[in-house]
Structure formats: structure tokens, C-alpha cells
Image: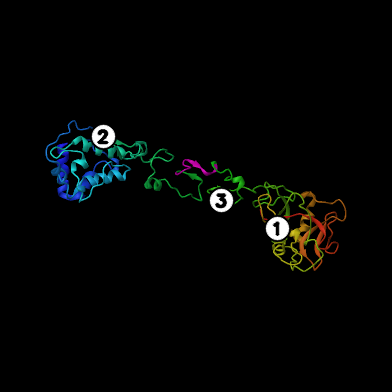
Amino acid sequence: MKKFFKFLYKKIVAGGVMGIAFVLCAGAVLAFTEPSSGPSVTEPASADSTGQIEILLGTSQSVSTATSTIFGYLRNVYTDIGGTPSSVAPNASDAGKLVDLIGTTATAVDGKTLFNFLKNINDSLDFPETSSVLSSDTVKNVSGSVSNCSTPGAQSCYATGSYYAATTQTLSAASETVSQGYYAATTLSTVDSDLAASKIKSGTIIFGVTGTFGNGPCCGSSTPSPGTVCSDGTVYAGLSPDGNEKMCVTPADSGSFSWNDGVEDYVVTGYTSTTDGDGNTGGIASKLDSESPHHAVQYCGSLLAYGYNDWYLPAKDELNVIYTNNVAIGGFDKSNSVQYYWSSSELGTFAVWHQRFTDGNQTATYYYKASYLHVRCARKGS
């Protein structure tokens, strides 16, 4: 204990209050490391020590000046960590004696009293459990048990910035394999069942998975026979007169709709093409006039079926191709001579081309726009 106070005195003389602060703080607080010969290790066996208290602590017995040289500093530390000192806080003009403040005599240092005061400070500190401290740090001379993360998926470890930098991965459009990070050593298709070739449109590649949806006898360079059911569920109807593209239809009628909004308030839309049903449908659907909404084209234009959203109401000549192959395609209403199907080809203010599937008759005068006729939606492409 004598050596401790001599060391303390040298630091006080050399650095004043800051020297004291250095001596007191260099021990147990930084990095949660406690000196092996410090508090809570071994209590001094003897209360006696040579030298006068005023020499060791840097004050006079009468305590007329510099009372707080060491006591005030220690008391402040204790107070900051939640302690409640029993004595009154000293100051430089305190008239009390050092024996009242420290609890010792003028001629002999009571090592046990000072030790216990320091030990009380040490024991009051809220040290973390070693299970929450890195292995490179110590708590009361005991190393922590938390190590840095070193492998993906490791638990109860400390993930450093360098670890994250080393385990991030930019997904590639050409591969679904994840080699690092949260889904390490797996493929995206195992966590997302929709990432499958059968659910991706033919010709589209997502993370290296090439879609096959829609593949079958209706795709490729060969031309199937009308009536062929494609692997996507649509039915091949023949070549559209609009560019001789392959044209497919839904396997059944979509119901009966009026061509306009069902009200006899007729206007001209201006979409009269007899071959481009896709163009007619898009243009008419976007019209805002007294006939809006145009139910037949609106239905086909907004249809999402069999994995496609590019359906349209066939134009006059496209509807005739569908009629030509209607037996192979199947599902058309031919119950009587008044069952007609709408086309998207307008003829005038009141008239739109429509066709009867019992005999193929095409007319624009049998029904007006407000009449409810059958609708069979079509789309072009493989």
C-alpha cells in the first residue's frame, strides 16, 4: 500500500489534478480492464503506513487550502456512478480537518479506509457480463466470450464492417445462385417458387432461368393447325390478316356485351380498320365520349388470362378468320340465326361490323351499337 501512495504522490506532483485523474482512470474503467493488484483483489492487511497524510495527499492537516485535491476528485467519481457519500462535499476553503473527510489520522495513513472507498467505487460500477463482451476485451481481468463473425450464418458473434463487406453479393441476371449473405449456399428458386421456367414467359430470362411459359405447338417456326390447344391454354385460330401473325383466341366465349355503353346515344369513334383489331381496341378503349365506356372492347382490352394481358376484340377480317376455323376452335354459339359476334371495326355512327357463326354472314346493320352480342377475345404472337 505504501508503494501505491508513493506512486500516486509522484503522479500528483508531476501532473496536478490531471495527473491524479490519469492515475485513477488508467486502471479499471478503460476497456473494462481492472488492475490485477487493484480493488476487489486483496484487501490490505494493515491499516498503518509510513509518512504523513498531508504529504501523501497533497494537503495540510488544517485543510485551509486545496482540500479537494484527492478527496473531491474521488467523491465526484463516486457520485457520478450513483453513489451517495456520507460526508459534506469539500472545497478549497473548507475549515474541516482531513481526518473528518478521509477518516484517518495525521501521522498514519489508514490504508483500509482509503482502500475500501476505492473498492466501493469499483464494486458500484456497472460492468457488463463477459457473455456480452468481445474476446479481445476484458472485464475485471476476465476475457469476453463474444468473437467476431467469421462464417456466413454464424450466431452469437460480432458482425464487423469488414465481415459485411466480405459477405455481400450482387445478384447476376445470368444466375440464381446465392453464395454469400443470408441465403448462402442456396438458389433463389428454393425461396421463391415463382422463379420457375414454367411461370416465366417464353423468351424471358430472369436470374438465369429461361421462361418456357407459352411454349408448345403454337410457338416456334412451325405453324400449328387451327384448333390446336397451346400449352398455355389458348387456342390457335389461324393467321391474322394484320401481318400474317399467329392469332390465338380464348377457348370459350367471354359473354355478351354491348359495343358501346348500352345507351342509344351514338357517336363516331373513327376506328374503322378491318384488319387491326389490336389498334382498334386500344384506340376505342381510350375514347372519352358519350358512348363510353365501350363495353366489348373494354372487356378484351383489360383481360388478363392465360398469362397474357394483350388481348383485343378482333377486327372484321380477323373475326372472319376465326369463323373460318370455328369448327376446329369450338365453343361458339350457333344455336340460331340471330346469334352474332362483335368485331372492333366501326362502319358509322350506329353501325359496327358483326358476324353470324351459323353461316358466316357479316353485316353492320342487323344490330346497332347498344345491342348485346357475343365476344371472343384474340391476341397475336407465339
CB within 8 Å, label 3 to label 2: no
**Three-letter amino acid code at disc 1?**
Gly
Q: Is residue 14 left or right of residue 333?
A: left
Where's residue 218, x and y in %? 68, 50
Q: Which residues are magenta?
A: 180-189
Q: Is residue 6 left or right of residue 34?
A: left
Tell me which label, 2 or 1, sits earlier in the chain: 2
Residue 272's disc is none
Q: Nearer the viewer, mark 2 or mark 1?
A: 2
Please, what secondary structure does the residue beneath circle 2 have?
A: loop
Cα separation between marks 2 and 1? 83 Å
Residue at (75%, 59%) from the top-left corner? 295
Q: Is residue 79 above or below residue 279?
A: above
Main secondary structure of the magenta stretch: loop
**Snapshot quadrant of residue 189:** top right
Residue 40's disc is 2
Q: Neighbour class for label 1 at 10 Å: few (<14), some, many (≥20)?
A: many
Q: Nearer the viewer, mark 1 or mark 3?
A: 1
Residue 301's disc is 1
**Three-letter amino acid code at disc 2?**
Ser
CB within 8 Å, label 2 to label 1: no
Cα separation between marks 3 and 2? 68 Å
